[in-house]
Image (cartoon, grey):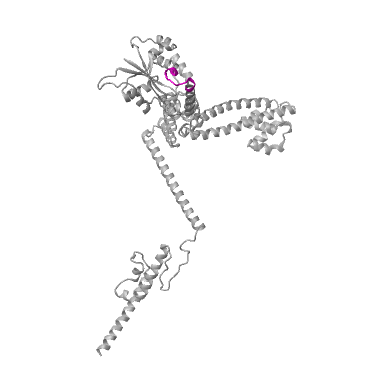
Amino acid sequence: MALYLLFESASGYSLFHAYGLDEIGQNTEAVRNSVHDLTRFGKVVKLVAFQPFSSALDALNQCNAISEGLMTDELRNFLEINLPKPKDGKKAKFSLGVAEPKVGSQIFEVTKIPCQSNEFVLELLRGVRLHFDRFIKDLKPSDLEKAQLGLGHSYSRAKVKFNVNRVDNMVIQAIFLLDTLDKDINTFSMRVREWYSWHFPELVKIISDNYLYAKIAKFVENKSELSEIHIPALADVVGDEDKAKEIVEAAKASMGQDLSPIDLINVQQFAQRVMDLSEYRKKLYEYLVTKMNDIAPNLTSLIGEVVGARLISHAGSLSNLAKCPSSTLQILGAEKALFRALKTRGNTPKYGLIFHSSFIGRASARNKGRLARYLANKCSIASRIDCFSETNTSIFGAKLREQVEERLDFYDKGIAPRKNVDVMKAAIESIGSQDADDGQKDEASVKKSKKKKSKGEAVNGEPMDEDKPTEVAADGDASAEPGTEKKKKKKKHKLAQEQQEDGMATEAVNGVNAHDIEENGTAKKKRKKKDREELDGDVHMETEKKKKKKKRAKTEDDE
């Protein structure tokens, strides 16, 4: 069976044909020895086709596809054109040797070309890579090196590209520095206590907090100068007036030795450094909280900022943590205990870093392992949502935290928790409603801005149509200048009122209501009863007068 070799270089795709190789007698050592000799290797392997890349961007896209185990359209066309086509219904009498097994499986799935990747093929490809510039004419070694260097830089640059707001490296460095600062602050605080205790040993028993001790040591300086006058200022530092009085009384009866001014200055400077480190530690913790809310909001709301950051740093990145199964995440940080248990055939650990979560501490002794397994499951879900979700929301983390709370209640009180499907549906619905509210707010803000623009144009531009003076012709009609719709309506109402006043009596006889004509058929509006009664009385009087006039005219005609 013939063997073809697919070689992906920085300059393009190339296809080689390996002659005179018997599959049964394939010897990797013989091929490895003959690779360095071009005369021997050139007789076995010959170039069939070469397709260069069109541009550096095309080379980068092809390299990314090969690294991910995908076959591009260009590679498929290249193989279909240059490889022999098998007859219909028969197996191919050749195979294609590739360096990446994933690419080979993808090629076989799409084109049905049989592929293989083994040590023999890799040795042949190593020889092709070594003598590649000799196989292709008009290709200088310097050009190939430039192509390899440019593609290597662009490939590395593309892999390093990231979203600035979601950099988990910053979280890893911050949590490492936070742990280091905790150790250093504790060490330095103990040094301050030991150093200043030679001068004021009673202060250690009164003040237990390290930061507050350093602050008081800097404030007091020489204990012999401390008096009752300093109690208000000392109370501001301590936060408790009783403790301030106790410190002053202890300073009066202190058993400590006196220190020289130079020694006191050094103690004060060191106490100031400890205070600065403690303040920087607080700022670093605030920074870590903000970064964790940006990078992993769901994991943060579920398990906390510090524990979540430790999980990410131990896994290496957020994507590595998302790839971990929940069983691995459960014992993350307890690797030594795990391997010791496997070696001695003892009990494996039940929890690692997630032991520092408040949920594990709240659970009873016999339920700690069960809750650790459940919490690791929810942390795995939250990390995957944070890693692969495009929207930055903490709703899922809050819902998962509610589930863990319900599980705690289930272990303690026996209350059945909700199902995971129902909780996830509720979370998705809340996200949808939140998006709808945001959309309505955006529409309202757009409408407000449009109204403000229109008002500004009316103020800064020409006067509005209602404010413009209207010209009236001699015959009483409106002039030909354009007016607004409101003005036209006003004119129509005026004309209707004039017609009503002229023919009020005749319309009343025919039973037509004057109010109906005035409103042009809109008789839905109700008027007060008093107005209607007055109108009816006036109409009735006018009809009676007309009837009397007609009777008088008839009697005069009869006479």
Q: Outermost residue, bottom direction?
A: 559
Q: Which residues are magenta?
A: 132-143
> Does residue 253 appear left or right of residue 88 in this picture?
right
Quadrant of the rendered image containing residue 285: top right
Q: Outermost residue, right direction?
A: 260
Which of the pair 368/33 is nearer the observer? 33
> Is residue 137 inside the magenta stretch?
yes
Q: Quadrant of the C terminus?
A: bottom left
Quadrant of the rendered image containing residue 71: top left
Q: Is residue 203 something that shows in the picture?
A: yes
Horizontal and vertical percent for residue 7?
40, 20
> Does residue 8 appear left or right of residue 186 in this picture?
left
Total numbered labels: 0
Horizontal and vertical percent for residue 530?
38, 71
Horizontal and vertical percent for residue 551?
28, 84
Q: Outermost residue, front direction?
A: 138
Quadrant of the rendered image containing residue 287: top right
Horizontal and vertical percent for residue 251?
70, 31
**Measured along the vertical axis of the image, is residue 395 above or below residue 470?**
above
> Does residue 404 appear left or right of residue 544 in this picture?
right
**Measured along the vertical axis of the image, is residue 95 above or below residue 413?**
above
